[in-house]
Amino acid sequence: MKTVTLNVEGMSCNHCVNTIEKTLKELGATGKVNLAAKNVEVSYEEGSVTLESIKEAIEDQGYDVV
């Protein structure tokens, strides 16, 4: 299991947290959003999902991965 921390712009409330964490779960990854730090700690299996697909899924929800 690989864990990375992604900086994400545009998150402001619990709805944002739930949206991102649900999106990651649907991909087969787990995420822990930190609104104050504007980041998401993501854990995933490298053979099952790619970092690029994780970033794309977050951006598809309207957030910017920087």
Image: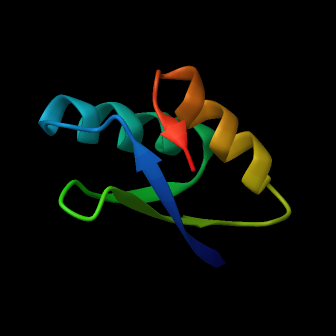
In the image, 12 versus 16, the foreground residue is 12
Q: Position of residue 57 (x, y in %)?
A: 61, 32
Q: Is residue 62 left or right of residue 32?
A: right
Task: Name which residue lies at 29% across and 38% down.
Answer: 11
Q: Position of residue 50 (x, y in %)?
A: 80, 53
Q: Quadrant of residue 44?
A: bottom right
Q: Is residue 28 left or right of residue 32?
A: right
In the image, 6 versus 43, the foreground residue is 6
Task: Name which residue lies at 57% across and 50% down.
Answer: 66
Residue 12 vertical placement versus 6 (above, below): above
Asked whether residue 49 appears in the rendered view, the answer is no
Task: Name which residue lies at 60% across and 48% down.
Answer: 28
Q: Quadrant of the N terminus?
A: bottom right
Q: How many marks?
A: 0
The single residue placed furthest to the left in the displayed view is 14
Asked whether residue 60 appears in the rendered view, the answer is yes
Q: Position of residue 7 (x, y in %)?
A: 47, 58
Q: Quadrant of residue 41?
A: bottom left
